[in-house]
Amino acid sequence: GSKPTTCPQCQGRGQLRYQQGFFTVARTCGQCRGTGSVIANPCSTCRGSGRVEKDRKVTISIPAGIASGQRLRLSGEGEAGPNGGPPGDLYVVIHVQEHPFFHRENNDLHCEIPLNFTTLALGGEILVPTLEGEEPFTVPEATQTGTVFRLRGKGMPDVSDRTGRHRGDLYFTVKVNTPKKLTREQRKLLEQFATTLPKEKFDPTPLDGHEDK
């Protein structure tokens, strides 16, 4: 369109002054909207604003350890300013997809691992899944189902730590994996083992955590 010219209504001041009794009131000029200039023949595409809408893709880098709800600010990647003004910023809100196995709390990870009764009773070495692969861990003898163990430094990285040295922990809960089908030999051995156990008593569990040997 044509070049901007001085607004004839406000004479380029961008404001109109009105006398109301003893007071002078200034209002924004309605013709130029406070810019002080008008375009007699505006561009038909941008209607004189100097900018048009256009979609484009921007490649961004996601830092390790970022959580859902956190934002990334890309300076100068927002909408262009009116009348050739500087562009704004682009804020990207992150939504992290849920993991099928791990549950995140702050920078710590939680999971549940089913184990055989013999592994909990006799103890043994297992492989605990982590973000970097499997980690060996020795289950102590006579471990009760529901016991929580911790692997230090195997959780999520701290997004504010650029060195990557500070990480959360991995907590995993062990539970008894009861087999759905037993062979004859397995059933016979379990029945023999059951005869050596004391008779079951449905007493409430004491609060002091006392356990029978």
Image (cartoon, helix red, strand yellow):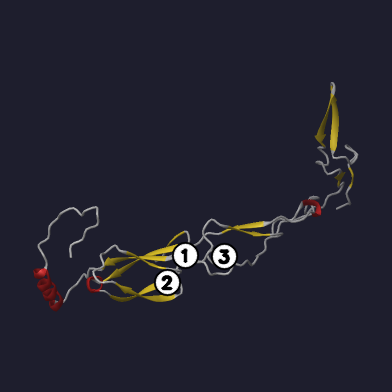
| Left or right of residue 130: residue 125 | left
Residue at x-position 44% and y-position 62%: 108
Whichever of labels 3 and 1 marks the residue nearer the N terminus, that label is 3
Quadrant location, the C terminus: bottom left
Helix, strand or loop for disc 2:
strand
State the residue lying farthest toward the top. 21
12 relative to 105, above or below? above
Give residue 191's quadrant in the image: bottom left
Give residue 112's quadrant in the image: bottom left
Alpha carbons under labels 3 and 2: distance apart: 20 Å
**Camera-side residue: 208 or 48?**
208
**Camera-side residue: 140 or 81?**
140
**Camera-side residue: 44 or 53?**
53
Is the residue marked by circle 2 packed among few (<14), some (14-19), or many (20+) residues within 10 Å? some
Q: Position of residue 53 (x, y in %)?
A: 71, 56
Tag 2 residue: 130
Whichever of labels 1 and 2 marks the residue nearer the N terminus, that label is 2
Residue 161: assigned label: 3
Residue 100 visible from this viewpoint: no
| Left or right of residue 213: residue 47 | right
Q: Position of residue 27 (x, y in %)?
A: 81, 34
The amino acid type found where label 1 is placed reads Gly
Tag 1 residue: 168
